């Protein structure tokens, strides 16, 4: 495995171009070079970083870790020579404009031309802002989400001192709309969180079925599309999944994480509000920050203050190279991941030794080895996970409700309420081409564990 270092020459060329913009400044050496010590420390850093799983490689198919595109790495590095701060225009003049352009391109995926939005430190902060606005608009009312929604919603609600309640999901990991309507009849729900791409299974809450309930009961809809939002560009969704994404533009707020499927380094989330009027909720006074320009400062519409302009530069450059368009190179990468998950699902079903919980809606697949009991299936999942890792294939484990497998013949005896299962996240476009290698290692891991029973 050879890491990309050819692009460093491109970075050097770009640094020269950047330097031209500051040619009128008097010479300044900056920090003392200390080259020998610098080399020593960086080599020590490289050695420490070897103690990682190969997150960048297609044989890593465990957690939601997608390598940044080279252009994102280069643009981020280039911007760090200036180190802009996108809080106020004084600190991030160019990168603030780049952030606004990049965020507008993301909003256009959902058909929004007029909106309020900005980048955040990640999905947690983006969801916090969305629920903070929800609490301001519906004070004293509850936030509800599926039991398979990300745990951050419960935790954020606690931070915001908003009441939070989990609702049941169906046998496919999606928010149960019948349970939701029964709960809505009590009249104390202010916001419903619809998750588009649950962390464990990649399931899509039925947003298209939740929207009519909003008209009847008058709550806000927050779409946590941190993981799945970009799939609005994919053309190989199942009909129900397409209906979900076609409805996304009607949500009141949307969170999407460019540092997941958007090919960005970590520290890049995005929150969007359909009504730009919610910006009034952010209004605050600063005696030293906002007086240098009549133009809107990003710090005036975000809860975070200092934010790295390098993140905006990386996102802007990536979207310049790979436009967010249906049928484009970026969208095809998403489609390849979905196709890889579907192909692995078919292999598992045809093989018979493993039982997938259900057909993947995005690029996440959960499955377990067929066994006599659920306890045995869970134990064997853990052993396969460990054996696969020794063979270079890195999967993940998840603890999921037994009912996800109840009609699928996983075990003869349901002796526990949950199943520890195997989980693969096939989010790299290269996963499709590497599926044979993944399958071979999974097969061998199964044989390893079968022999040691």
Image (cartoon, helix red, strand yellow):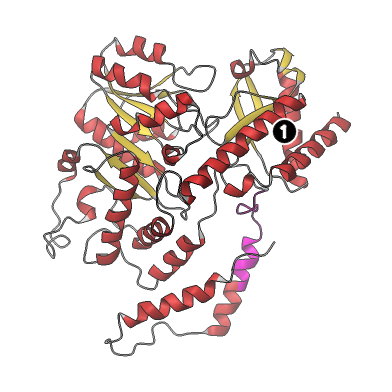
Quarter of the figure with residue 44? bottom right
Name the residue located 55 percent from the left edge and 30 percent from the top edge. Answer: 201
Q: Is residue 192 above or below residue 332?
A: above
Q: Is residue 212 visible?
A: yes
Find residue 110 and report its horizontal and vertical position in percent. Answer: 33, 38
What's the residue at 71%, 31% (across, down)? 347
The residue lying furthest to the bottom in this view is: 27
* SS assignment at label 1: helix
Give 261 or 239, whichever is nearer the viewer.
239
Asked if residue 367 lies left or right of residue 209, the reply is right
Tell me the quarter of the picture where residue 47 sits: bottom right
Q: Quadrant of the N terminus?
A: bottom right
226 with respect to 112 (left or right): right
| Magenta region | 43-58
Q: Is residue 342 magenta?
A: no
Q: Which residue is mark 1?
A: 382
Q: Position of residue 24 (x, y in %)?
A: 26, 87
Image check: 54 left or right of 351? Answer: left
Badge 1 crowding class, 10 Å Cα cut-off, few under 14, some 14 to 19, many 20 or more, is many
Residue drawn 20% across and 30% down?
137
Q: Is residue 159 above or below residue 323?
A: above
Q: Residue furthest front?
A: 327
**Along the viewing direction, whichever of 31 and 444 lies nearer the viewer:** 444
Q: Position of residue 365 (x, y in %)?
A: 61, 32
Instruction: Identify whether 146 is placed above or below 115.
Output: above
Residue 160 visible, this angle: no
Q: Position of residue 56 (x, y in %)?
A: 60, 54
Quadrant of residue 88 in the image? bottom left
């Amino acid at each position: 495995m050879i890491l990309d270092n050819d692009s460093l020459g491109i970075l050097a060329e770009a640094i020269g171009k950047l330097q031209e913009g500051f040619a009128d400044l008097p010479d300044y050496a900056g920090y003392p070079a200390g080259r020998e010590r610098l080399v020593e420390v960086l080599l020590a850093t490289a050695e420490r970083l070897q103690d990682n799983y190969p997150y960048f490689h297609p044989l890593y198919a465990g957690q939601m870790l997608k390598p940044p595109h080279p252009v994102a790495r280069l643009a981020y590095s280039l911007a760090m020579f200036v180190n802009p701060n996108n809080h106020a225009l004084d600190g991030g003049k160019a990168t603030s404009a780049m952030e606004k352009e990049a965020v507008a391109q993301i909003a256009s995926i959902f058909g929004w031309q007029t909106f309020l939005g900005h980048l955040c430190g990640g999905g947690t902060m983006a969801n916090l802002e969305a629920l903070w606005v929800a609490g301001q608009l519906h004070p004293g009312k509850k936030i509800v989400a599926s039991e398979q929604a990300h745990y951050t919603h419960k935790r954020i609600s606690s931070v915001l001192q908003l009441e939070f309640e989990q609702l049941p999901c169906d046998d496919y990991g999606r928010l149960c709309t019948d349970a939701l309507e029964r709960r809505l009849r009590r009249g104390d729900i202010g916001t419903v969180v619809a998750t588009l791409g649950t962390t464990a299974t990649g399931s899509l809450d039925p947003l298209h079925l939740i929207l009519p309930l909003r008209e009847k009961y008058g709550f806000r809809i927050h779409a946590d599309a941190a993981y799945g939002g970009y799939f609005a560009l994919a053309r190989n969704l199942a009909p129900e999944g397409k209906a979900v994404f076609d409805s996304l533009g009607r949500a009141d707020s949307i969170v999407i994480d460019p540092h997941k499927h958007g090919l960005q380094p970590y520290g890049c989330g995005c929150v969007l509000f359909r009504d730009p009027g919610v910006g009034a909720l952010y209004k605050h006074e600063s005696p030293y920050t906002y007086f240098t320009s009549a133009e809107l400062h990003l710090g005036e519409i975000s809860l975070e203050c200092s934010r790295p302009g390098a993140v905006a530069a990386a996102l802007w450059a990536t979207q310049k190279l790979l436009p967010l368009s249906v049928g484009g190179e970026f969208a095809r990468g998403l489609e390849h991941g979905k196709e890889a998950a579907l192909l692995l699902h078919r292999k598992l079903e045809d093989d018979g030794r493993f039982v997938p919980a259900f057909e993947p809606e995005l690029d996440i697949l959960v499955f377990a080895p067929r066994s006599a009991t659920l306890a045995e299936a869970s134990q064997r999942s853990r052993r396969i996970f460990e054996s696969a890792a020794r063979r270079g294939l890195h999967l993940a484990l998840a603890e999921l409700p037994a009912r996800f497998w109840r009609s699928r013949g996983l075990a003869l005896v349901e002796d526990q309420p949950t199943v520890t299962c195997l989980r693969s996240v096939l989010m790299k476009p290269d996963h499709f081409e590497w599926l044979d290698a993944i399958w071979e290692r999974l097969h061998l891991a199964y044989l390893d564990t079968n022999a040691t029973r």
